[in-house]
Amino acid sequence: MNTPPPTRSRRANAAQTSTVTLQQVAERAGVSPSTVSRILNGTAVVSPAKQAAVQAAIQELGFRPNPVARGLAGGKTFSVGVVTQTISSPFYGEAMYGIEGVLDAAGYASLFVSGNWREDDERKAIETLMSRRVDGLIVFAGRLSDAALKRYAAEVPLVLVGRRSPGRQFLSIGFDNRLGAHLAAEHLLSLGHRQIAFITGAHQHADALERRTAFEETLQAAGLKLDPDLVAEGAYTEPSGQQAAQALLARGKPFTALFASNDQMAIGAALALHRAGLRVPQDVSLVGFDDVAVAEFSIPPLTTVRQSVGEIGAQAATALLDLLADRPPRVTLTPPRLVVRESTAAPRKR
Amino acid sequence: MNTPPPTRSRRANAAQTSTVTLQQVAERAGVSPSTVSRILNGTAVVSPAKQAAVQAAIQELGFRPNPVARGLAGGKTFSVGVVTQTISSPFYGEAMYGIEGVLDAAGYASLFVSGNWREDDERKAIETLMSRRVDGLIVFAGRLSDAALKRYAAEVPLVLVGRRSPGRQFLSIGFDNRLGAHLAAEHLLSLGHRQIAFITGAHQHADALERRTAFEETLQAAGLKLDPDLVAEGAYTEPSGQQAAQALLARGKPFTALFASNDQMAIGAALALHRAGLRVPQDVSLVGFDDVAVAEFSIPPLTTVRQSVGEIGAQAATALLDLLADRPPRVTLTPPRLVVRESTAAPRKR
DNA sequence: TTGTACGCGTTATCAT
DNA sequence: ATGATAACGCGTACAA
C-alpha cells in the first residue's frame, strides 16, 4: 500500500489564495516572524537593515497579511458592521458610499446589512454582525431602542446616525431636523404660501417628529397654525408619499404648497399631484428633504433641504475610526441648507 | 515582586463578545471538542445522547461559533465579495438587496464594494476581497476584462453578472439585451414612430453594444435605418443621459421618440426634454431599460423594459451558492418584458 | 462512534 | 532590538 506523504497532506482544502505567509517572508528575509509582524504593525522599532530586507521580501513574494489569522490572534477583524434600513434606497446608497470611502482607506471592510425598518430584522442583523466579530458598528436609526443599542455598545464602539441619543454609551450623530424643516417652511412662507400641507414620516421616529414640530413652530411664528387636515403620514418611501398626497387631496382642503419630510415621499407626492391634474409649482409648490441625487432630476427639479447624506456617512465612519483608535471622536456636521430649484414658486393670485 | 497570574493574562484585549468557546461547550456537555464540531458541521454521525447534551450546552451557554477561528481552521470564511460599480445607484441597490437576502439566509455574509467603473478600482476591490479570503465572488460587469476575471476565478468560484462570457472558468449571467432592446424598439415602431433617437451606454460595454445592435436591427427589419445623428453616448447615469439628450436636440434632427439604454439615462433625458419645452409623451415618447424602482415615479411614469435586477442578483447568489457546494448551478432567468406606462404614445399627426 | 493531537497564520509575552 | 514560544478557537486526520 501507498503510504501518503507525511506532511502537508491536508493542504488541499486550505485557502486557495496566493498563500504566502508571514513565516515565509521571515525566512526569506532571514529574520524571525515576530520581526516581520513588528514591521507590519509598527509595534516596535526595528533596525533599518532588517526593515529593508523584510520590505524587499514582502515585495518579492507578494505577501498580503491574512486578516483572518490576524483576527484570531489579535482579536480584531478590521471590519465594521453597518446597519442600514433599506440597502436599495438612494438615501442609504449615498450613505454607504460615504462610509465605504473612509473605511476602505483605513483598511477596514464594511459589512452592509438591511434592517428593513423592522426591529427584529435590525436585531438579527446586529447579532450576525457581532457573531462575525466586527470591530465596530454604525447603525442608522430605525426601530431599535436606545436601550438595545446600549447593550451592543457595551461590546463594541457604536455610532448611531439619524437620531440623537443622550448618554455616553455610544456616539450619536443627528441631523439638524429642526433647522431643516424651519428652512423649508420659511421658504414657502416667504413665497407667500399660507395653506401648506405636510407629509410626515412614521410617527415612531424621533426625526419625523422633530421635522414636524419645527415645521409647525415656524408656521406659528408666522401667525399660522398647522391644520390637522393638511397633515398626512408616510413611511419615507415613494409609494407612501404618493398615497399620503392622495389622501391630502381627497380631504378637499385646499393647499398651495406641500412639504414632504423626505425627497422620496416628495417624488411620490409629485406623481399624485400630476395624476390629479395639478402642476408643480404653478398649482402646488413642493419641497423635499435630504437632497438625494435624484431630486435634481425630478420634473421639475425638486427644491429641497440639503443634508449631504454621503458626508454624514463619512463623518460617522471617521468618528468610529476615532473611537476604535481611542481618540476623541471629531464630528463637524455641515448644517442643512435650502436648495431652491424649480418645484417652488409663489402661489397663484386669485 | 508580584508574579502575574500564569494564564489568561492577555484575555483583556481579546474579542469582547460573549466569548463562549466550543471548548467550553464540550466540557459542559462532557464530550470532546471534536464531537461538538462534528455536530455543528454535520461532519459525522454522533450518538443521539451526546447530540442532545451538546445542543443543551450550546443553548445554556449561548454559544456562537467564531467565524474567524472557523475561517482559519477550515479555510472558509462564509463570506462572499460583491463588486458593484456604483454602490449608491438604484440599479446596484436593488441587486444588492436580492443578493443579501439569498446569501444571508444561507449563512453567508456579503461584502459589497464599489468598482466605480474604473478598472483599477475594480482590481483593487477584488484584491481586498481576496485578501479577506472571501469564499466566492459576484462581479457586476465593469471595465475588468474576462482575462483578469479568469485569474480570480482560478482561486475562488466567481459569477459574473451583466456580461456573457464564454468558457468554463466562471459562470456568467447576462441580461437578454437583444430581446429587451427589440421589445422597446418594436413598441415605438408599433406606435407609429419612425424617427427614433437612441442613447447608448459606454461603447466599451458589451451590453451597451448589444442593446444598440438589437435596436438597429429591429429598425432595419421595419425598413428603417439608424441615423447616426440620432445616436448619442451616455454613461448609465442621470447627468450623462441629460447631456446626451441635449446633444441630440442640439443637432437639430427631429425625432418623435427616444430610447435610452437604461432608466437612469432616460430620467436625465426627460429633464433635458422638459428644459427644451418638449412634453413627454406628446412631443417625444421616452423608453428606458431596467425598470428600476424610481421609473414608476418619474413624471410621467416611464415605459421601460423590465429585467428584475433584484431577481437577477438573487439568481447570481443562488448560483454562487451552488458553485460553493459543488452543485451544478441552476440559473433560470426571467426574460425581460416591456412595461408600458405613460411616457410613450403615438406621434402627433402633423 | 469518539477522543487526541496538530495545524491554520498571526500577534503577544517573555526572555535575551 | 530581536527571537522563541505560546496562545487565539476551530476543523480534521488519525488512532482507538
Image (cartoon, coloured by chain):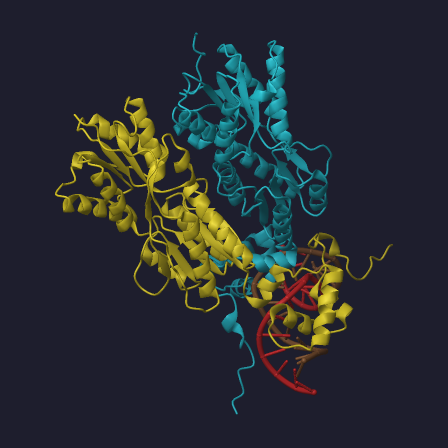
Chain colours: A yellow, B cyan, C red, D brown
Q: Position of residue B265 (x, y in %)?
A: 50, 30
- Image vertical order of residue A280 relative to residue B26, above or below: above
- At 47% from the left edge and 65% from the top edge, which residue is drawn? A324
Task: Give the vertical position of A224 relative to A124 (above or below).
Answer: above
Query: Where B119 falls versus B272 (above or below)?
Result: below
Query: Which is nearer the eye, A7 or B166?
Result: B166
Would you identify the image quadrant in which residue A267 lies?
top left
Q: Quadrant of residue A148?
A: bottom left
Of the 4 image quadrants, the one containing the C terminus of chain A is top left
Q: Is residue D4 left or right of residue B50?
A: right
Where's residue A35, x and y in %? 68, 74
Residue A204 visible, this angle = no
Foreground: B317 or A342? A342
Q: Residue furthest top?
A: B350
Residue B112 appears in view: yes
Q: Position of residue A33 (x, y in %)?
A: 69, 71
Q: Residue furthest bottom?
A: B1
- Mark count: 0
Does residue B78 lie above or below B12 as drawn? above
Position of the N terminus of chain A, as image quadrant, is bottom right
